[in-house]
Image: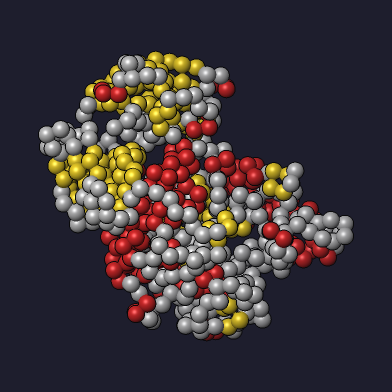
Amino acid sequence: MLPHHDGSATHVSNPAPALGETVTVFARVPETAGVSQVHLRTTPDGEPHFVAAVPDRRRGGEVWWRAEVPVHNPVTSYRFWLTGPGGDRWLNQYGVVGHDVPDATDFRLVADAPPPQWHRDAVVYQIFPDRFARSAAADQHPPPEWAVPCDWDTPVVGLGPETPYQFYGGDLGGVEQRLDHLAQLGINTVYLTPVFPARSNHRYDAAGFDQIDPLLGGDAALASLAAAVHARGWRILGDLTTNHCGDAHPWFAAAVSEVAAAERELFYLDPAGDYESWRGVKSLPKFNWGSAELRRRFFDGPDAVLARWLRPPYRLDGWRIDVANMTGRLRADDYASEVAAAARAAVAAARPDALLVAEHAHDATGDLDRGGWHGTMNYAGFLRPVWSWLRGPTLDLADFLGVPGEVPRRDGGATLTTMRTFAAAMSWRSLAASWNLLGSHDTARIRTVVGDPARQEVAAGLLFTLPGTPMVFAGDEWGLTGVNGEDSRTPMPWHRPERQDRRTFDTYRALIALRHAEPALRHGGLRWLHADPDALVFVRETPAEAVLVLARRAAGTPVRLAGFDAGAAAVNHYGGGPDLRGDAEGVLTLPADGPTLQVWRLG
């Protein structure tokens, strides 16, 4: 084993400190690592400062070195300098390195208010309302003029001009009627993609933010659904687009109809009447966050856009922010951090326990730990490496999340490197508050990517055991398929049991139950123990317990883990593998069959 530290409570006395507080941190160093002295390096006000750490205790063949970190700045960075017969090394978030490295991957203590505590225990379920379920009331709403009406069994187009307009008529009453399905699965947080009026089935082209789409049942339907969700002790999250609206939005209509309109400053309009839009799609005009009036409408007061739906009778528990990476950014303009901080303040004023998660499909690390978004959708640091490691032998996708060509094939070492690289560039707090996901309404389905139930189980095992909040896209638990985001927006086959993979459903239910039962999987730190082409092994641990996880994409050589006590016991809690016991040299030997996901509790 290697020297280790992470931002969890096992190694940090207070992971949510206030500015001016002093926090105790611990670096655990194997006695065999050749380390005789440890120094802590901080950079208060940008200047490096070293203090000597002291041995605090010895346990399990490790020395725990203790040091004090004054929380001098809103984001206080630190790392450890290890010296001794084994050589001089740095220990930072990326791991142990024998050369000088930039500060970007140092450990971080963040002094602003922490994400809501409930989110660490959440399992999020993403619902695309048009395709989830229809109540009887849905028949009272005739399809709008923009729609291509479909019955529940009509295949989705997947690609083509009709994709935004296929209309299946799912509504919020239908969601409410299917909450028992979520309860059986173990879900405790409902996330709805947009529910505002629009001229598309996806509703990211909002035609207003002051009412719920009547096609979904209107304001009363959201209030009823939220009440039913809260009655179960769950949470419910909305989806808000801060980068753009639809061209049917009254703000935009006013802006283009009158040069002197107050709404004109809300957008990027030139004298000839042309305007900026999301990726050149003219139905999605882009907001200009240099506008004080736009900020007022979104953020100021209880009736502003962000706050209104967090209050009774709806009481949404937070927002997922669509294309947060583009919000406030256009050529020389970059208001992204200002917008994120203003959104955070507005949400906190309305609901101190509300969540704010940003969509970001690539490197989100530069937009976190800045007093804005609590976390991000972890496409880059989780979904992409998991897809690349577990992809099936034959896979034909149009692109890999916007990257030309097919999903690359990566081995376990490259997968671990990718995960560590992105995790190292954000605080532990932001990592834990980010959503891990295997797919969404914008991607191919995980079953299509991996090709079979066994590899999907391994993928789901990583989803529910690694740090971060797991998000399940509705239908993944039944093994539904799709080659891209549009193709994946499949109506839930409630009436077609032959399309429901009950084995996969039972797998998800068991893994979610495991996560709920093991505090280490929700609140514990993370130590990577092994990576080879076909296997990843790690430990999640709190001061009270430790859980060992083996993920295998294929059968291979048994993994031998050294550094345990002779006779140390590991009891299997998931996967059906044998209980383990350390041999005379303190080695645990993990099974070699695969694909498999195995979980043991360490004694």
Q: How far from the left and from the top, in percent, is residue 559?
A: 24, 44
Question: Which image quarter: residue 593?
Answer: bottom left
| Residue 49 rendering spot, x and y as whole percentages | 50, 17
- Left/right placement of residue 76 relative to residue 273 reads left
Q: Is residue 470 above or below residue 428?
A: below
The picture quadrant where one finds residue 512 is bottom left
Q: Is residue 417 visible?
A: yes
Q: Is residue 14 shown to the viewer in this render? A: no
Is 319 placed above or below 498 here? above
x, y percentage for residue 155?
50, 80
Q: Residue at x 43, y 45 (%)?
A: 414
Q: Residue, x 40% and y 19% (percent of image)?
A: 88
Q: Is residue 518 above or below residue 42?
A: below
Residue 6, quarter of the rendered image: top left
Residue under the image location 49 percent in, 24 percent down? 100
Where in the figure is residue 189, as x and y percent of width and height?
Answer: 41, 58
Q: Quadrant of the N terminus?
A: top left
Q: Nearer the viewer, residue 228 or 129?
A: 129
Residue for point 60% across, 54% down: 323
Residue 437 is left or right of residue 141, and the answer is left
Q: How is the image coloured?
A: secondary structure
Q: In the visual, does 413 lie left or right of 18?
A: left
Residue 219 or 484: which is nearer the viewer?
484
Total labels: the figure holds 0
Q: Quadrant of the C terminus?
A: top left
